[in-house]
Image (cartoon, grey):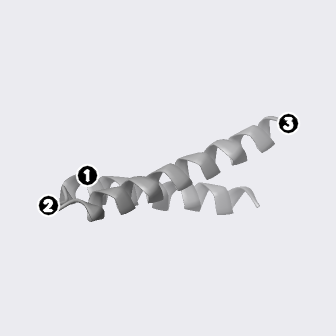
């Protein structure tokens, strides 16, 4: 059960990071540092999620 909760949390983190990056690029002047930070969060969460399977 705890492994399933961690996997759900990682999916939520990944989806939120992707959503935040898309929202940053829809603005007139995107904050590149924040976008890069969100991309790195998405990469790490995807890596951990794939490591669980």
Q: Which mark is residue 29?
A: 2
Quadrant of residue 28 in the image? bottom left
What residue sits 45% from the left and 53% below the top? Answer: 17
Residue hosting label 3: 1
Which of the two discs, 1 and 3, labels the residue nearer the N terminus? 3
Q: Give the distance between the C-alpha atoms of the residues marked 3 and 2, in whole angstroms.
A: 43 Å
Q: Which mark is residue 34?
A: 1
Q: Where the C terminus falls, by quadrant?
A: bottom right
Which of the two discs, 3 and 2, labels the residue nearer the N terminus? 3
Compared across the picture, whether 26 is left or right of 38 comes to: left
Residue placed most toward the observer, 12 or 29: 29
Residue placed most toward the observer, 47 or 42: 42
Q: Secondary structure at mark 3?
A: loop
Label 1–label 3 contact, CB within 8 A: no
What residue sits 64% from the left and 42% below the top? Answer: 9
Which mark's residue is nearer the viewer, 1 or 2? 2
Q: Secondary structure at mark 2?
A: loop
- Number of numbered tags placed on the structure image: 3
Which of the two discs, 1 and 2, labels the residue nearer the N terminus? 2
């Amino acid at each position: 059960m705890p492994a399933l909760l961690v996997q759900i949390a990682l999916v939520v983190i990944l989806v939120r990071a992707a959503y935040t990056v898309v929202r940053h690029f829809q603005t007139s002047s995107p904050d590149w540092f924040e976008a890069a930070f969100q991309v790195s969060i998405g990469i790490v969460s995807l890596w951990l999620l794939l490591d669980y399977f």
